[in-house]
Image: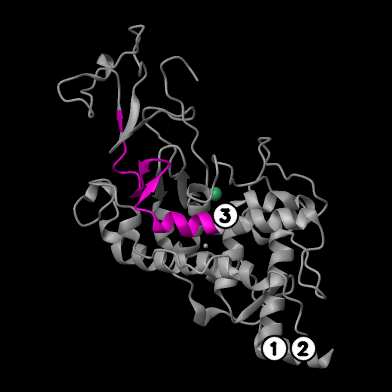
Amino acid sequence: MAHGLLFISLLLCLILTVAVEAEVDVWKYFNAPFRSFPDTDERCGCKSHKAEIESAYKEAAKMIDAAAEAFTWINGRPFPDDNSLDSFKWMRIVVAMTSILGIEIDSETGWRLGPRDDYIFSCARNVFVRLQNGMKRDGKHVNKFNGLYCGTSGFQWYNYTSDDPTNVGQKVSDDRDRYGDMYWPDGFWYFNWNKFMLEEHTPTDNHLCPPDIVARATHELSFILLCDLAFASPPTVVKSKIENGMMLDEDELHHNIAHVFVHELTHYDGSLDNDILDQPAHDEDGNIQYRSDGTPFGTYHLASVYNLAAAKPKLTCKSAQSLSLFAMAMYLEEWTWDVEGAMDYPTWLAWRLDS
Ligand SMILES: [Zn+2]
């Protein structure tokens, strides 16, 4: 860490074995005083999005519950090969676990095939349990209050000659370390309780919501930021638009605020020590896919999620998009999702009886 200067890494983002349910009151989760309440403080920017956020968060909690329940249900359950709804459910869960998370399960016994599968299984299950528990706590994350912000209009730059927004009567330049050096010689970005200056930041651009960014989760600063782009999507999954053959990441399914919440919450409360990331994207041969500037693409699209499961299965439980797509697949319980796309129960049954 640079002397006296706080450099904090922000997670760059595009965009619950226990019989408990996630807490569904979003304002209880983001309960920091004057930090996130849309009713009392417009500075969070969320007031005009109150209803969307409430319904999105509720559905996100259902996705997290559905994912956690899937782990409990499938654990040690052999395939009931009788074309029943239970056999459909078994297939629905196992296909998603295998293709999205890289967990292989023995249909005869219902147990994982090997130690690696056991590792991924418990690793991913624990993420969802942490998310459920996080939603049940009193709105705190690593001993700081959870913040929710919408858009970046509340973030302001303060240079060293400015009045310090956190210390009445003082200048930013008055904030000194024990050697007498200025803590913030260049200034800082500030929003409510957070002062920060990131490496890519400039005084005129905090880079928090560039045009293609939907949302961010900042583990260290304890807030989730929904960019304007998030609100271009419906708050919840539009179930009426789901058809046989659809892929899990088709826009109709994938672009909704609830899924964004699950993705960001995995970074936020699902992580142990900030370890759930947007993993580098892999191609079909298991090679990392790079942009022209030499940085890797992120694992966001379904193909790269499948490729990650095939090439680096142990990373799937550290991949926000793999976990959030799995949760969405489990939530949409009328559909099985395999590499050919969605199948509902009647279609699956006809296909089974036919083959
Ligand atoms: Zn992300």
**Element type at mark 1:** helix
| Viewer-nearest residue: 11 or 245 | 11
Residue hosting label 2: 351
- Please say if the residues under marks 2 and 3 sit with CB atoms less than 8 Å apart: no
Say which mark, if any, is on residue 127.
3
Residue at the spot 58% in from the left edge and 78% down from the top edge: 333
Q: Neighbour class for label 2 at 10 Å: few (<14), some, many (≥20)?
A: few
Image quarter for residue 127?
bottom right
**Element type at mark 3:** helix
Q: Bounds of the magenta span?
A: 129-157
The answer to whether residue 261 of the structure is visible from this angle is no
> What is the C-alpha distance between the residues marked 1 and 3?
32 Å
Q: Earlier in the sequence, mark 1 or mark 3?
A: 3
The quarter of the picture where the C terminus appears is bottom right
Q: Find residue 290 and report its horizontal and vertical position in percent.
A: 71, 42
- Please say if the residues under marks 1 and 2 sit with CB atoms less than 8 Å apart: yes
> Is 130 included in the stretch rendered in magenta?
yes
**Element type at mark 2:** helix
